[in-house]
Amino acid sequence: MANPWAGEVALELNGERRVMKLTLGALAELESWLKVDNLPDLVERFESGGMKSRDVLALVCAGLRGGGWSGDLTDLAKAEIGGGPLEATRAAALLLALAFRPPQ
């Protein structure tokens, strides 16, 4: 079960429930995949409204890898996401919001 207080978001992947989390390692991979230089630029990319489907794919993949999944972008591109692109986008946005929310 995903724990939002720990920055976790659930997503169904190929019929299996997975937990996503943006760990520091996952964020480093995401920066590399999206070719951004730092975390503020990464967040700005998603907040600017110019997000592309490949950005969502990379964010979901980074979150899945942070949650322990061993697949990569190619595996995710071929996977069936429960709820389709809309659910993937919703989950990606929530994942990013939870990762960068101020401490409570």
Image: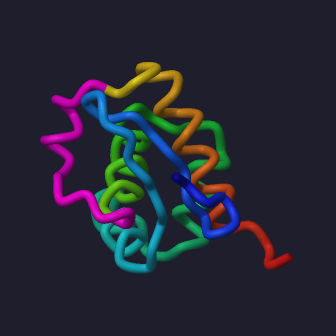
- Front-most of 74 and 31? 74
- Front-most of 41 and 87? 87
Please indicate whether residue 19 sits to the left or right of residue 91 in the image: left
Membership of 50 in magenta stretch: no
What number of labels is visible?
A: 0
Most extreme residue toward the front is: 1
The boundaries of the magenta stretch are 66-80
Membership of 79 in magenta stretch: yes
Relative height, residue 22 to residue 83 (above, below): below
Residue 88 placed where, x, y %? 46, 33
- Front-most of 40 and 59? 59
Residue 5 placed where, x, y %? 70, 66
Residue 69 placed where, x, y %? 25, 58
Location of residue 14 (image quadrant): top left
Q: Quadrant of the C terminus?
A: bottom right
Please indicate whether residue 96 sits to the left or right of residue 23 in the image: right
Which residue occupies 52% across, 27% down? 87
Relative height, residue 38 to residue 52 (above, below): below
Which residue occupies 32% across, 51% down? 61
Please indicate whether residue 6 sits to the left or right of residue 84 in the image: right
Which residue occupies 33% across, 62% down? 35
Location of residue 77 (image quadrant): top left
Location of residue 7 (image quadrant): bottom right
